[in-house]
Image (cartoon, rainbow, N blue to C red):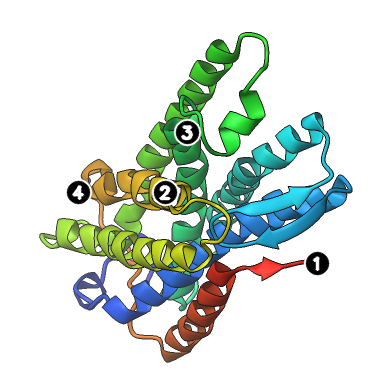
Amino acid sequence: MTKSEISPSTERAKIDFLTISAAAIIVYFLCCFLHEAVGHGGTAALLGAKVTKITSAYVTHEGASNFQARMIASAGVLTNLLFGCLAIFMRRHLQRSGNDVAHYFIWLFGHMNLFTAGGYLMTFALMKVGDLNIVVRGLPFEMAIRIAMLMVGLAIIVWTFVHAGKTLVEFAGQGDDRMRRGVTMTLVPYLVGGSVNVGASLLGVGNVPVAIVLMSAIGATFGGMFPLVWVPKMMPRSNDPISVLTPTRSIPWQIAAVVFLVLYLLFGRGMSFA
């Protein structure tokens, strides 16, 4: 079957809820790990600061100068932005294979990293708490910088929103059930991954006030990811037949999700460094 042909059986192939939930758990963990451990934690280590604790919601460190603290605080968003762009680029050049779940995983991973970056910028740019507040507080023209970050975040969200809708059609198809399929591919990960992330974040509440942890976790997941729910509305309509990708049941992906779920909960409790 060529790309220009369509198979009715493929068009109506059943999307497996457990498998896309599994992909969502893995993607959410990786986005969170990249933001906190790789972005904040890795930058702190590279700059010579002492990392004292890493959780799925925050990183604490000591010994950083004011400039270094700003660099560390900005690294989470920048890391998500980098990996999101890499995933989108990689998927564009990835040949279609028989593993439709892997294609969906990369699609979700790329767009969710970008939604995370844009969501952080939009949600926290004007707030007096969080990473971005550390980055800009006390700088000359602080309010102008905050407004600029808000606009950049909006631009990232809009581009990601449009691109996600344009490429979601590869999974939803052009049939009568296209909207149902599209909503399944976006709403399920939003609810499952977001719930797991918030739950894991609450396990790591220590010296950081629970309100800040909740604000960060909910803002970054259900807030920053909210455009994902509306992505199906952006799917283009066309009379051209397409070959539809369908994440069907995959036991290996489900087993991997169980492993990542355990890692997620452990990451939520946090890792302390004496």
Residue 217 image offset from top left, x and y in percent: 44, 53
Q: Which residue is mark 2?
A: 211
Using the rendered view, name the quadrant where residue 10 is placed: bottom left
In this figure, which residue is indicated by the disc labeled 3?
124
- Judged by depth in the image, the label closer to the viewer, 1 or 3, is 1
Q: Mark 1 = which residue?
A: 274
Asked if the residues shown at circle 2 and circle 1 are in contact, with their CB atoms under 8 angstroms apart, the answer is no
Amino acid bearing label 4: Asn
Position of 162 with respect to 259 (left or right) is: left
- Lower sequence index among marks 3 and 4: 3
Q: Where does residue 142 sit, x and y in percent of width and height?
A: 59, 14
Q: Residue furthest left?
A: 176
Amino acid carrying label 3: it is Phe
> Which one is nearer the viewer's eye here, 130 or 231?
130
Q: Nearer the viewer, mark 1 or mark 4?
A: 1
The amino acid type of the residue labelled 2 equals: Ala
Mark 2 to mark 1: distance in Å?
A: 26 Å
Residue for point 47% across, 33% down: 124
Label 1, label 3: how far apart the Cα atoms are: 30 Å
Residues under numbered marks 1 and 3 in contact, where contact means CB atoms less than 8 Å apart: no
- Regarding residue 77, the answer to whether it shows in the image is yes
Q: Position of residue 188 (x, y in %)?
A: 28, 65
Residue where numbered disc 4 is placed: 239
Toward the right, the furthest residue is: 48
Disc 2 secondary structure class: helix
C-alpha gap between disc 3 and disc 4: 42 Å
Question: Which residue does the image show at 44% across and 59% down from the upper left?
Answer: 108
Q: Quadrant of residue 243?
A: bottom left
Q: Nearer the viewer, residue 163 or 142?
A: 142
